Every structure is written in structure tokens, then in C-alpha cells.
Image (spheres, rainbow, N blue to C red):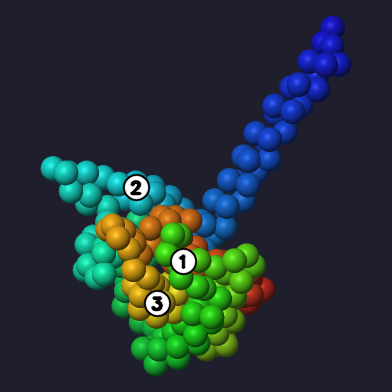
Amino acid sequence: MMSIGFAIYLLRLIIPIVFLASIIYVALLIYTRAFKEMGFSAFDALTILVISFIFGHPIYVNGVDISNLYLFTYNNWIICINIGGGVIPIIISLYLAIKKKISPLKILSSLIVVSIFAYYVTYPDPNEGILSPFPQWLVPAMMASALSAILYIDDHRKAAPTAYISGTIGVLIGADILHLPELLSYSSKKPIIASIGGANVFDMIYITGILAAFLDAILFIKRRRET
């Protein structure tokens, strides 16, 4: 018969594993649902996730890291953009804007608002880069979702793509580009690499667009069932 001590040991071992597996499962559900709302299949979503994850880590070819594209150097700051957390979300945004025929004016108006909010909920840190505390980093996603829902109240199929675009590019502009001069103002005696989207699939650029699209999926769930 199993002893009480051994049973407690098993529970302590199993509960964290089950908890972690549940979090991963829910995260994948949100991720695939968001991409389905934008017209991608679950396979497409997972493929994008895997590619983003791979290129979010250093990949050296002949001594050159091809996962971080060099942009410029200033005041000992080496500025790059990460393929997984920066380039791929930008490519997806451009694809959606063209494929879904999103109004440039609506994209621009939502981008301006999301960029402003993204700027004010983030701040530069010379040791960590661009940071945003919880739950403030959720604000740009909520704003992108709300604005897209308002702008496309009569065409909900374009709402999620617009939310993704404004959330992704809005954070790129408001959090990274607008704060870049402040970050570069910090002097350093040795070279420091700052990579836009460098946190990979956990970067605010990457996450905001997905959350915004997912929130739109919730907002329009009733209308989607009616159609």
C-alpha cells in the first residue's frame, strides 16, 4: 500500500506539472484562436510560432548572428531587430493589411492611439531595455482591440487583423522607436546590444497583436455565430 508520505510527494511533483501544462494549453488556445480570427489555420499559427521561437534565439552562421538583424550603432549601443519577435510580426502585419484590404486611414488612426498608450506604459532601462510593468503592458492590446471593434463594427472579419496590426506596429512605434532616443542617451563604456523584439515570442510587440486579435474574437463571438 502506498504510504501517505509517498502520496504527498507524488502530489507535490504532479501538481506543478499539471499547472504548467494547463497554462501552456490555455496559451496555445488563445494563440491559435487569435490567428484563426485573422484567417490563418491552426497549422499556420503553430508553424509561425515555431519559426518565431527558433529565430528568436541566437543562430550563428560563420560567426554572424542571423537571428538579429543589425540596424545601426550609436554611443556604444548596437541596435538590432530580432527576426522572431520583431521582423515576423511586421511581415504578418503587412500581409494582413494587403490581404484583408484594411483601410490605411483606419490603420493610421488606430496606430496613433495605440502608439501613444504604448509610449506611456513603457520606459527605457539601460540594463534591461524597454520595460512595462504588469498590468500596464495589457493596455495597448485592449486599446487596439477596442479601436478595431469600433472602426469595423459593421465588418467584424476585418476587426481582428486591424487589432493585430495596430497592436504590433503601435507597440513597435510607441514603446521601442519613441523611447529609443532616451535609451541611446545612456552612455556605456562597452558595447551593448539592444534588440527590438528581443524577448522573442514573449516580447510585448509579439504578444500585444495576438492578445488584441483574441479580444476581438471574444467581442464579436455572438455576431460570428449569427452569420
Horizontal side of 37 relative to 180 (left or right) equals right
Dot 1 or dot 3: first in sequence order is: 1
> In this view, which residue lies farthest toward the left?
62
Vertical side of 98 occupied by 45: above or below: above
**Amino acid at circle 2:** His
Q: Secondary structure at mark 3?
A: helix
* Quadrant in the picture for residue 95: bottom left
Vertical side of 202 occupied by 79: above or below: below
Alpha carbons under labels 1 and 3: distance apart: 9 Å
Alpha carbons under labels 2 and 1: distance apart: 21 Å
* Quadrant in the picture for residue 146: bottom right
| Residue where numbered disc 3 is placed | 182
| Residue found at x 57% / y 80% | 143
Quadrant of the drawing holding the N terminus: top right
The x, y position of residue 7, in whole percent, is: 80, 19
Horizontal side of 164 relative to 81 (left or right) equals right
Dot 2 or dot 3: first in sequence order is: 2
The x, y position of residue 183, in whole percent, is: 38, 72
Q: Nearer the viewer, mark 2 or mark 3?
A: 3
**Amino acid at circle 3:** Glu
Circle 3 packing at 10 Å, graded few (<14), some (14-19), many (20+), is few
| Residue where numbered disc 1 is placed | 125
Vertical side of 48 occupied by 159: above or below: below
| Residue found at x 35% / y 51% | 56
Circle 1 packing at 10 Å, graded few (<14), some (14-19), many (20+), is few
Q: Secondary structure at mark 1?
A: strand
| Residue found at x 32% / y 63% | 188
- Judge whether residue 133 can be spotted in this image: yes
> In this view, which residue lies farthest toward the front?
189
| Residue where numbered disc 2 is placed | 57
In this rendered view, identify the residue nearer to me: 189 or 11.
Answer: 189
